[in-house]
C-alpha cells in the first residue's frame, strides 16, 4: 500500500511540473501546487492583468470590480509569506474580502496571541469551505489546534488542505504525520513517513 501511494505521489509531482511549464501561457489550473516560484509568478501575472484592465475601455464600474477581485487574489497569494501579511491585509480591507479575518488570525499568531488567533480562525472556518490559494492559513490554524486544543481531527483536516496546496512541504507533512499518530492512524502515518523520506532526499 505504501509503495502505491509513493508512486502516485511521484506521478502527481511530474504532472504538476508539466502544468508549471504552461503557467506563462495564461493557464490557471486550480490544482497547481503553491510552491514559491508559482506564487511569485502568479502574483506578477495578476499585477500585469490589473495593468491591462486599467488601460482598457471597459465600463468603469466593471473595471473597478475586476481590479478588486484580482487584487484580492494577489493579496491572498502574497499572504503565504508571513512578511507580507500586513500588506495583504491592507489590500483585502479595501476589497472587503472575508479572507481578511484569516489574515487577522495569522497576524495575531505571529504576535503569539494564540487565543485571539484561534478565535478568529474558528470564526473564519465556520463561514464555509476553504477555497483559497493560501496554504499558510490552514497550516497555522492546525498548529494552534494541535498545541492549544484537543481537536486533533480538525487539525488533520486543516493539514490535509495545506498539503493539497503545497504537497512538497516537509514541515507540513511532519505535522500531518504527528497528528495522524496522535489520532491513532498509524498506517497513514507510515505513508507520510515514506513521503517525508522522499522529499528529504530530494532537498
Image: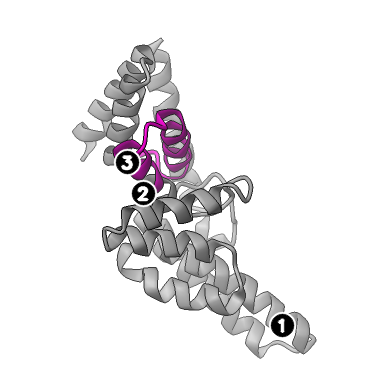
Kindly report the distance in space between the C-alpha atoms of the residues bearing marks 2 and 3. Answer: 12 Å
Q: Is residue 147 shown to the viewer in this render?
A: yes
Circle 1 residues within 10 Å: few <14, some 14–19, many ≥20 = some
The answer to whether residue 82 is above or below residue 150 is below
Q: Which residues are magenta?
A: 140-169
Which is closer to the viewer, label 2 or label 3? 3
Residue 143 falls left or right of residue 62: left
Ranked by sequence position, the earlier of labels 1 and 2 is 1
- Please give left or right for residue 190 compared with residue 87 in the image: left
Tell me the residue that label 2 is attached to.
Answer: 140
Looking at the image, tell me whether mark 2 or mark 3 is earlier in sequence order: 2
Location of residue 56 (image quadrant): bottom right
Task: Give the labeled residue for mark 3.
Answer: 148
Foreground residue, 199 or 65? 65
Q: Earlier in the sequence, mark 3 or mark 1?
A: 1
- Look at the image and tell me in which quarter the N terminus lies: top left
Please tell me the numbered disc located at residue 63: 1
One can see residue 195 in this view: no
Amino acid at each position: 500500500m505504501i509503495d502505491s501511494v509513493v508512486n502516485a505521489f511521484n506521478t502527481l509531482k511530474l504532472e504538476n511540473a508539466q502544468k508549471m511549464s504552461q503557467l506563462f501561457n495564461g493557464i490557471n489550473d486550480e490544482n497547481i501546487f503553491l510552491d514559491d516560484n508559482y506564487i511569485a509568478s502568479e502574483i506578477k501575472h495578476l499585477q500585469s492583468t490589473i495593468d491591462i484592465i486599467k488601460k482598457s475601455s471597459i465600463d468603469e464600474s466593471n473595471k473597478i470590480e475586476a481590479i478588486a477581485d484580482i487584487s484580492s487574489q494577489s493579496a491572498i497569494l502574497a499572504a503565504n509569506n508571513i512578511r507580507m501579511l500586513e500588506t495583504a491585509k491592507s489590500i483585502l480591507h479595501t476589497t472587503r474580502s472575508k479572507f481578511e479575518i484569516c489574515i487577522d488570525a495569522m497576524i495575531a499568531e505571529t504576535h503569539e496571541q494564540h487565543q485571539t488567533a484561534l478565535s478568529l480562525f474558528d470564526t473564519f472556518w465556520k463561514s464555509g469551505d476553504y477555497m483559497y490559494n493560501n496554504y499558510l492559513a490552514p497550516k497555522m490554524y492546525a498548529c494552534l489546534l494541535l498545541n492549544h486544543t484537543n481537536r486533533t481531527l480538525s487539525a488533520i483536516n486543516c493539514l490535509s488542505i495545506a498539503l493539497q496546496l503545497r504537497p512538497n512541504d516537509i514541515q507540513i507533512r511532519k505535522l500531518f504525520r504527528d497528528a495522524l499518530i496522535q489520532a491513532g492512524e498509524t498506517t497513514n502515518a507510515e505513508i507520510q513517513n515514506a513521503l517525508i523520506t522522499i522529499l528529504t532526499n530530494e532537498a
